[in-house]
């Protein structure tokens, strides 16, 4: 996931894909679309449950009723909101970076927004690293003994 996010954000930011007009959209950074980031979150959730089920079998679901069965809805909600919050964080940071560049380009000459665009490349790499690291931590949490 890290390589996909990193390479796609860099290619969308470095190459002027918005110049190429497509009949149904444009070529741009894929993580500035909420559908892509939610798909990454769903992929993380599937990997989370797959890792837990392959390691512990059906006993994996026993963690949802620990320490008391009353917490079952909260434990289920927690497992789905972790990756979803990651996807919203990724989407918002990439979109905010692109909006800052668009506003700067419209207000000042092109010389000023260029350093901000390079800062955007740096932050997109950091966002890819954060998403992949936290996704790996969530998946690792599903296979450890006690959490």
Image (cartoon, rainbow, N blue to C red):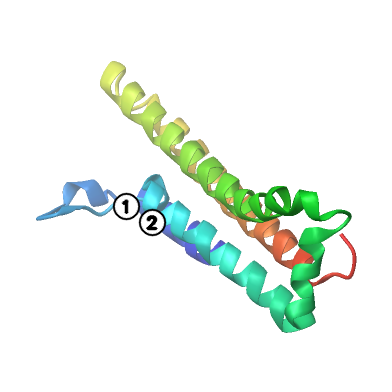
The residue closer to the viewer here, 146 or 41, is 146
**Looking at the image, can residue 139 be seen?**
yes
Label 1: which residue? 15
Quadrant for the C terminus in the image? bottom right
Q: Residues within 10 Å of mark 1 (few under 14, many from 20)?
A: few
* Left or right of residue 27, residue 50 in this image: right
Q: What residue is rendered at 32% in x and 52% in y?
A: 15
Q: What residue is rendered at 68% in x and 51% in y?
A: 73
* Left or right of residue 53, residue 36 in this image: left
Q: Where is residue 49? Give x, y as percent.
A: 65, 70
Residue farthest left in this picture: 23
Q: What residue is rendered at 74% in x and 79% in y?
A: 58
Q: Where is residue 68? Give x, y as percent.
A: 86, 53
Q: What residue is rendered at 85% in x and 69% in y?
A: 144
Answer with the quarter of the image where residue 109 lies: top left
Marks 2 and 1 sit apart, C-alpha to C-alpha, by 6 Å
Mark carried by residue 11: 2
């Amino acid at each position: 996931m890290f390589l996909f996010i990193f390479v796609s954000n860099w290619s969308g930011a470095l190459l002027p894909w918005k110049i190429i007009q497509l009949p149904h959209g444009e070529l741009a950074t894929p993580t500035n679309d909420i559908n892509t980031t939610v798909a990454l979150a769903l992929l993380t959730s599937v990997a989370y449950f797959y890792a837990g089920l392959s390691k512990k079998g059906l006993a994996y679901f026993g963690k949802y009723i620990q320490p008391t069965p009353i917490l079952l809805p909260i434990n289920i909600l927690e497992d789905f909101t972790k990756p979803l919050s990651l996807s919203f964080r990724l989407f918002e940071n990439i979109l905010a970076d692109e909006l800052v560049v668009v506003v700067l380009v419209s207000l000042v000459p092109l010389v000023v927004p260029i350093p901000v665009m390079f800062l955007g490349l740096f932050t997109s790499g950091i966002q890819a690293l954060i998403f992949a690291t936290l996704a790996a931590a969530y998946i690792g949490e599903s296979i450890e003994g006690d959490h």
